[in-house]
Amino acid sequence: MIEKIKTGWELLLKGDYAPFLEVLTHGKLYRGYYNLLFIFNKKSESELADGNLKVETEHRVAFDSPDHIAPVGTKQDNSTNRSFVLLMNKLLRREFPNTQLKYLDLGCSGGQLVKDFRDLGYVSAGLEGSDYSLKHQRANWPLLAGKSLFTCDIAKPFEIKSVEKSVKFHLITAWEVLEHIRIEELDNVFKNIINHLEEGGYFIASTTSASSMSEGLELHQTRMSNQEWRKYIQERFKELTPADSGLKYYQYVRFRYTALHEGNSFLVYRKK
């Protein structure tokens, strides 16, 4: 709470009224509105899509990842943001009409975002590098493990299939994930993203240049500015082109009020 007050005060002193008011209204006061609107968009149990999904990989757990060795996010997070979910649902249904939409979340932790898209009728999947949530049966894992939630090292080769056919997704997200990957493994991660992304589909990720320590281990193994991330992607992955989804920073799925000063930002791309 003290950090929130401090950040708000700093914004006001600098004259940054717009971010302060947007966070206050959209991030706080409108949260109940978005949650209510989400309820009216939910599908009934009989309307939910059964993707018959399975993940083929030789690397079920990212054993050498600091996030598995000293778990924090995978131990605590079960984040969602209904404003983001509804924004992307409206966009995807407009751009892919009369289509069974599919959603993939990388680093899904407790899986609430995966469940929210599933509740809107998507074939929805989440991959988590640690088996902490699975072993402790926390959050959405008791209900969705092996159906929509799977453990998998996303820095190693994997393939998601349905009835023995490869699955392509219309939206892939990676919230507070990319900075946790060692830079020498990033190419593998992006190859997996491109291989699983539908043509015209969106890839959305958050980035940060801040440090994050747990039990003496640095969790953020690759810290780059947004400009550096964009240069990295542009130079290596011509299949991805920058896009505008209308996303605002208060729709950050794991939005924290203090994140306005922590170098956090978005990456939004489409597959050609």
Image (cartoon, grey):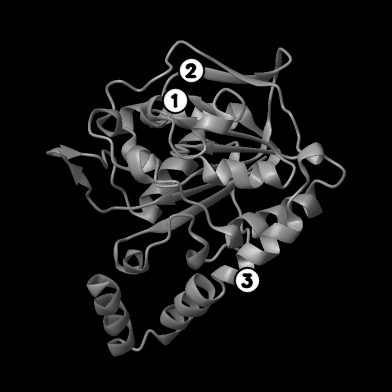
Mark 1 and mark 3: span between their CA atoms?
39 Å
Give the numbered dot on residue 271: none
Chain-order first, disc 1 or disc 3: 3
Q: Is residue 114 above or below residue 132?
A: below
Name the residue type under label 2: Pro
Disc 2: which residue? 157
How packed is label 2: few (under 14 Cα within 10 Å), some, or many (20 or more)?
A: some
From the image, state whether disc 3 or disc 2 is nearer to you.
3
Disc 1: which residue? 188
Disc 3: which residue? 33
Direction from residue 22 to residue 90 in the image, left or right = right
Q: Name the residue located 71 percent from the left edge and 12 percent from the top edge.
A: 164
Mark 3 and mark 2: span between their CA atoms?
40 Å
Residue 260 rendering spot, x and y as whole percentages: 35, 68
Mark 1 and mark 2: span between their CA atoms?
7 Å
CB within 8 Å, label 1 to label 2: yes
Direction from residue 256 to residue 253 in the image, left or right = right
How packed is label 3: few (under 14 Cα within 10 Å), some, or many (20 or more)?
A: few
